[in-house]
Image: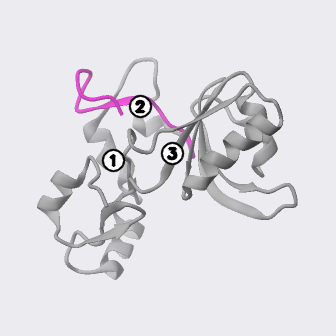
């Protein structure tokens, strides 16, 4: 079991951790329990640590084709800067995993899912079909958190800076993203 990049700060905020998929994950920040945090997410905002999710970079000239053949959504409609929630399925339709897929560039996708097996399966499919697509794990390099709830945009707008070529946090549409920095133009890239 390992600590995520957020662990030093999270450990200052809570002692309530559980092991989940190889990471120490906080279970509660408020001391009030999951019901209070559920209502915070519905009425204000909640922060959730998500480092245990598996992340894969799918790149190459056939990256879109690989995903088009393996997920239930039409990846051809996914614009750069857009994400989509989908299922990865076997040829017979059985579900392998669910994932959120982001299009970072025309031939560059990020797959965020639950299972390590998903990356190996995608690599096997690319090889089986003779596709020029590469699947690389980025789980250890990308530790993510989610800020969710009706006040999440207001909270993020105060701490996130986006450059002039990127939409501001308040301008982002449903399932869209922007390249940003924490705190200002010289802050760490997000």
Horizontal side of 107 relative to 189 (left or right) equals right
The chosen color scheme is one colour
In the drawing, does residue 131 fall left or right of residue 109?
Answer: right
Whether residues under marks 2 and 3 lie with C-beta atoms below 8 angstroms apart, the answer is no
Is residue 26 visible from the viewing direction of this image? yes
Q: Which residue carries the number 2 mark?
A: 168
The first of marks 2 and 1 along the sequence is 1
Identity of the residue drawn at 50% across and 37% down:
177
7 relative to 124, above or below: below
Q: Position of residue 173 (x, y in %)?
A: 55, 41
Residue at the disc numbered 3: 55
User: Dot 3: within a 10 Å radius of its alpha carbon, few (fewer than 14), some, or many (20 or more) residues?
Assistant: many
Where is the N terminus found, in terms of image quarters?
A: bottom left
Magenta stretch holds residue 181: yes
Which residues make up the magenta segment?
173-190
Q: Residue at x 46, y 32 (%)?
A: 178
Q: Which mark is residue 154?
A: 1
Task: Report whether 145 appears left or right of 17.
Answer: right
The answer to whether residue 46 shows anywhere in this view is: no
Quarter of the view holding residue 182: top left
- Label 2 vs label 1: CA separation? 11 Å
Residue located at (76% from left, 42% from top): 125
Q: Earlier in the sequence, mark 3 or mark 1?
A: 3
Which residue is found at the position 27% from the left and 29% from the top? 188
Disc 1 secondary structure class: helix
Label 3, label 1: how far apart the Cα atoms are? 27 Å
Q: Secondary structure at mark 3?
A: strand
Quadrant of image for the C terminus: top left
Front residue of 116/46: it is 116
Q: Secondary structure at mark 2?
A: loop
């Amino acid at each position: 079991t390992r600590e995520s990049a957020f662990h030093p700060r999270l450990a200052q905020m809570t002692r309530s951790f559980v092991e989940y998929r190889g990471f120490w994950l906080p279970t509660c920040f408020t001391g009030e329990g999951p019901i209070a945090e559920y209502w915070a997410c519905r009425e204000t905002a909640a922060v959730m640590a998500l480092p245990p999710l598996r992340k894969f970079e799918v790149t190459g000239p056939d990256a879109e084709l690989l995903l088009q053949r393996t997920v239930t959504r039409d990846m051809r409609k996914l614009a750069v800067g857009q994400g989509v929630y989908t299922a990865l399925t076997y040829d017979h339709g059985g579900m392998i995993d669910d994932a959120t897929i982001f299009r970072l560039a025309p031939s560059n996708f990020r797959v965020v899912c639950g299972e390590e097996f998903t990356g190996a399966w995608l690599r096997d499919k690319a090889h089986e079909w003779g596709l020029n697509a590469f699947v690389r794990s980025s789980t250890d390099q990308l530790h993510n958190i989610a800020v969710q709830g009706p006040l999440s945009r207001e909270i993020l707008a105060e701490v996130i800076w986006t450059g002039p070529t990127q939409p501001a946090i308040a301008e982002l549409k449903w399932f869209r993203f922007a390249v940003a920095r924490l705190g200002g133009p010289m802050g760490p890239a997000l």
